[in-house]
Image: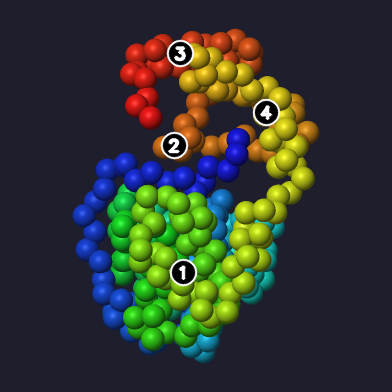
Amino acid sequence: MLSVESWTLDVEDCAIVTNSKFEEIAQILREHQRFAILGHVRPDGDALGSQLALALSLQALGKEVCVWNEDGMLEKYSFLPRAEFLTKPPSIPEDFDVAIALDTAIQNRLGTALAAIRSAKIWINIDHHMSNPGYGDVVYVDSSAPATGEIIFRLIKSEGLPFNRDIAGNLYAAISTDTGSFQYPKTSAHTFEIAAELIRTGLDVGRLSQLLYENYPRRRLELLRELLRTMRFQEEGRVASFSLTLKVGAELGVLPGGGHALAAGARVRGTLPEVEDRVLAEVGVKVKSLKSPQC
Ligand SMILES: [Mn+2]
């Protein structure tokens, strides 16, 4: 039930994607006037931060830019610089010179933002998910990048596109959140070098970190309290489980969580105690078959 949207595991079949050069992308950005910048539904910090960062750079270049996400700006990211620039897409589709999908492995995960594009002369697809099949006319997918924000930073810097503190703040949020605060394995020395360059624009890292990681809505704490209250341990402490009834979930105003490679979901018929027992019995069998951890 906790946020799993940013846990992306690149295990799906992957197509060989031939990347365009930054030079070619920058030329398209400079030569056209009207842009739509889109990101995936149920956005995370990387999607929202990357969208805003590229949009602000294009706006500073004198372009006309729409920044759309099906879910609009999430309350928890509303502190991002120029957050109000990102809106829900309109119900009547519009025409663009260039539509740019960011951080979105599968094009239809753009949701209603995709439907709001009646036409685009060029589709650009910039992403870091290995499962991205390379849709669009111009593609840049780098699965070694820990965040789409890192690719946007490299594009902006290598091509001399406008860069300022607002752009840096959005990119810092994108990279920080998608690396789990610079902890996940794809975090490299280069990632820290980029972060250093972003901070040099004058970012207040302490304040940004506080807003990113230490501010919770009350219902998140209430959800955590409910989950911890039901927590139990089995298999000599190697299995921990907790549960949430739909009734309590509805009272707390939280949605049922989706499925993800690292956070699988299933619908199982039965009462909660019955289903819990069945799932935990299966987990117990699996755990018994595993060797003891070495560390
Ligand atoms: Mn991402």
- Element at label 4: helix
First in sequence, mark 1 or 2: give its number: 1
Mark 3 vs mark 2, CA separation in Å = 19 Å
Name the residue furthest front.
Answer: 295
Foreground pick, 89 / 72: 72
Res 73 quadrant in image? bottom right
Left or right: 165, with 251 as reference point? left
- Earlier-in-chain disc, 1 versus 4: 1
Q: Which residue is mark 4?
A: 228
Query: What residue do we see at 66% from left, 60% from top?
Result: 211
- Dot 2 falls on a residue whose secondary structure is loop
Q: Number of callouts in the render? A: 4
Q: Is 75 in front, or is 157?
A: 157
Residue 173 position in % (x across, y down) = 54, 64
Amino acid at pointer 1: Ala
Q: Earlier in the sequence, mark 3 or mark 2?
A: 2
Kindly report the distance in space between the C-alpha atoms of the residues bearing marks 1 and 4: 35 Å
Quarter of the image that includes the N terminus? top right
Give, as a three-letter code, the residue at label 4. Leu
Q: The residue tagged with tag 3: helix, strand or loop?
A: helix
Horizontal relation, residue 20 to residue 72: left or right: left
Q: CA distance from mark 4 to mark 3?
A: 20 Å
Q: Position of residue 84 (x, y in %)?
A: 67, 71
The vertical placement of 20 against 107, above or below, is below
Ligand 1 within 8 Å of disc 2? The answer is no
Task: Give the label on residue 284, or none.
Answer: 3
Report which quarter residue 213 is drawn in: bottom right
